[in-house]
Amino acid sequence: TWSEYKRHIEKDPALTRRFQVLQIAEPEEIPAMEMVRGLVDTLEKHHNVLILDEAVRAAVQLSHRYIPARQLPDKAISLLDTAAARVALTLHTPPASVQFLRQQLKAAEMERSLLQKQEKMGIQSDERRDALTARIFSLNNELTASESRWQRELELVHTLQELRVAESDADDKTTLQQAETALREWQGDAPVVFPEVSAAVVAAIVADWTGIPAGRMVKDEASQVLELPARLAQRVTGQDGALAQIGERIQTARAGLGDPRKPVGVFMLAGPSGVGKTETALALAEAIYGGEQNLVTINMSEFQEAHTVSTLKGAPPGYVGYGEGGVLTEAVRRHPWSVVLLDEIEKAHHDVHELFYQVFDKGGMEDGEGTHVDFKNTTLLLTTNVGSDLISQMCEDPALMPDATGLKEALMPELRKHFPAAFLGRVTVIPYLPLDETSRGVIARLHLDRLVARMGEQHGVTLTYSEELVAHIVACCPMHETGARLLIGYIEQHILPRLSRYWLQAMTEKAAIRQIDIGVNGDEQIVFEIVC
């Protein structure tokens, strides 16, 4: 490599002049495909599978886009080899779904056996034993159905492979086409046995390696993306216009029509505190990116000095911390398919703002060690409270409130006081509105419903609440600088402590609580009705 040449050879002129340096650059995609095609026969013989040419093209294209840390053709060959091994494995071993059900069944039977052993000693656990018996019955039925489906699919694949060998020289391919059609209809969108190495198998390997859904969307996934604004609205209330803009950008990217050189989206969420900006990031990570564990949160108030740039991207050579990586770059390297939340971006130093120009434009940056970090599969959300007073004033009267475009235009002069024009030109500014009374009621119900679920899961107690309680909470929590956080704080201060006391008191008295009803009396006081 160049670094090894510089370290061991270039420093010695006598040694350097005895060699002619030949630069071997990484090949482009088309030459790389030709190289990989030369190894297809070897891979087919080794794994005893058929490798389609579409798999070769997919291996080169997908590895080039989604695996930047390695070089072509090495990474494409490794990807194709792994895909061939997976196809060969599906022809000889049960699929993961069947193995998982077998493990679950074995664990349930072991637990039931232990309970039966305890019952012989006089330790009764009838409820748990009955629940396990029902679960074992359900798992047996599910396992039988899965094994039957797997065996049928395996038969269809073997039939197809035999016909391909028998009819390879035949002019009439009708029987072969019928077998392919029968297999496709049986498999649907969730095949477990593969007759050949296709582009879909290669894309699945890329998804496993990187966490990025690189393959063609199946029907269910496409439906989820189409319904994204509605799914986000289940957690974020009163921001339908903002969620629609974010949803449209995600839909464009998942349809493959976005700019592949840039991140999925770069949004600046501007509005008062507690109106759903951070919750939007959590909801987006949950809805599209596989869970909140794929949310990278950076508090930008910690980067108010120019030198803190090195904390984000890693210290340069010769400085303390070199080689340890940056807070942002390491997080994105480990989770390339994620939501990056830059909270309170207005508090960061201007040098920190400039650091993100290359991310917004080219979808990547170099860390302190010179390693490229890919941001092309991330969605960046920047939150700011700049202009929150202006937004609140303009939204005081619903009849005179401007639309989203007018609100954004009115907000831009305030934003320009804190951000350079070059920065604002690279982001999509989305105003977040103050919460009205209806939205605050929806949020109160959402948190009360979570409390109901916790009581049921943790203690098996039915918890109910009245609409009067929701109205009381909303009335006690008018729109404030803290927004929805005031509602959450009210529930934590006025409902949870009393509920906890009732539960602990019942435990000390050995009383079994079956139901708790929470309401409001005529004096506007919260009351609890306990049913034992």
Image (cartoon, helix red, strand yellow):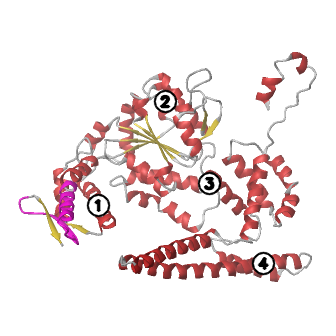
Residues 350 and 44: in front is 44
Q: Which residue is mark 3?
A: 256
Binning the other alpha carbons within 10 Å of mark 4 as few (below 14), some (14 to 19) or many (20 upward) gives: some
Q: Is residue 342 above or below residue 451?
A: above
Q: Which residue is mark 4?
A: 158
Q: CA distance from mark 1 to mark 4?
A: 53 Å
Magenta extent: 496-523
Q: Is residue 275 magenta?
A: no
Please state which of the two labelled residues, at mark 3 or mark 2, is closer to the viewer: 2
| Dot 1 alpha-carbon crowd within 10 angstroms: few under 14, some 14 to 19, many 20 or more | some
Drawn side of residue 210 relative to residue 290, left or right: right
Q: Residue at x 51, y 56 (%)?
A: 290
* x then y, percent, for residue 72: 78, 45
How far apart are labels 4 and 2 at the CA level? 58 Å
Within 10 Å of disc 3 (Cα), the crowding (few <14, some 14-19, many 20+) is: few
Q: In the rendered structure, which amino acid carries the disc numbered 1?
A: Leu
Q: Which residue is mark 1?
A: 451
